[in-house]
Amino acid sequence: MPSTLALTTSSAGIPFMLAAMFVFSANDALAKYLAALCPVAQLLLIRNVGALAVIAPKVHAYGWFAVTRVPRVWLHVLRCVLIVTELALFYTAVWQIPLADTLTIYQATPIIATALAVPLLGEQVGWRRWLAVVVGFFGVLLVVKPSGTGLSVAHLCALAGGVVYSGVILLTRLLRESGPVPMIAWHVGGTLLASALVAPFVWQPVSLVTMLLIALMGVVSTGGHVLINRSLALSPASVVMPFHYTQIVWGVAFGWLFFRDAPDWRMLSGAALIVASGLFIMHRERVRAQEKR
């Protein structure tokens, strides 16, 4: 039987994961408000200037040119393209539909990634995980059709964003040997470059307070990633990742508190199916990893 000390050590990362989900959800609530005030390209440009200010010291210490000397550069470029596309889809969706709907759809990302890993990475997925994928997609369908009358463009954008983000996750898995500093540098730098090319053509005047709030999003988002990294450094992924689903709870809370978006039975039922499917997939992946030892 594991000792109390061992159990305490393995769970040390949980508070950091919980804090990260709170931070990301609060940031997404702020994004919902700000995305209605200016074009997406302008929002991304200002947001990533804030993020660059945070990561600049680490990149400087690592070496500005050193971060570009990574293996398989074209995959890093593709990852940047997918990140920019996903962010544009997310911001397009989140200001039009309830925050909880958007975040719930995005919680299906591990399910989508499991399905995509078969054709893209050649991974083997057993019938149990395929069943979980089907159940999870049924949950997504419940969320993206909240009124029962059909798919809205905003819900489709959220769903497409979740699919694209799954591609980002798979590429991140492939490129993890590049190291954390080059990965975040390519992330921020690629998004900054893409938005800088588009933003001048769609720029709209905004107040200084709005610009500062948008820049704050980049700072807060970077802080959230730091919390997740700390969480994974202290505890196994199998211990802390289930707490990722608390983002749905915060999404419902912030959506109701700031935007008066009350979740309906479809959203809650879909969220339950997505969470159950995701947890089962995590369980099966842990079992398979143990069997291979």
Image (cartoon, helix red, strand yellow):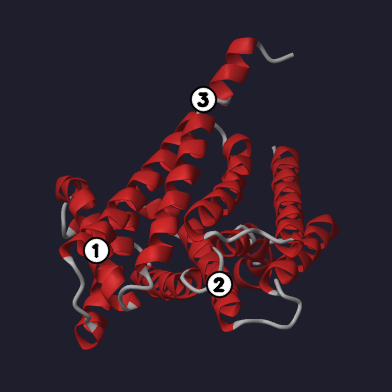
Number of marks in the rendered image: 3
In the displayed structure image, the side of residue 83 where residue 102 appears, left or right? right
Dot in front, 2 or 1? 1
Marks 3 and 2, how far apart in space?
33 Å
Q: List the single residue furthest toward the front.
A: 260
- In the rendering, which numbered label is found on residue 210? 1
Q: Is residue 262 above or below residue 288?
A: below
- Residue ID at (22%, 88%): 201
Tell which of 247 and 222 is nearer to you. Answer: 247
Q: Earlier in the sequence, mark 3 or mark 2?
A: 3
Element at label 2: helix
The quarter holding residue 136 reads bottom right
Element at label 1: helix
- In the rendering, which numbered label is found on residue 12? 3
Three-letter amino acid code of the residue under disc 2: Ala
- Residue ID at (75%, 68%): 142
Q: Quadrant of the N terminus?
A: top right
- In the rendering, which numbered label is found on residue 158? 2
In the displayed structure image, the side of residue 237 where residue 85 appears, left or right? left
In the displayed structure image, the side of residue 233 where residue 111 appears, left or right? right
The quarter holding residue 137 reads bottom right
* Residue 221, x across and y down, in percent: 36, 52
Dot in front, 3 or 1? 1
Element at label 3: loop
Q: Quadrant of the C terminus?
A: top right
Three-letter amino acid code of the residue under disc 1: Thr
Marks 3 and 1, how far apart in space?
37 Å
Q: Residues within 10 Å of mark 3 (few under 14, many from 20)?
A: some
Q: Residues within 10 Å of mark 2 (few under 14, many from 20)?
A: many
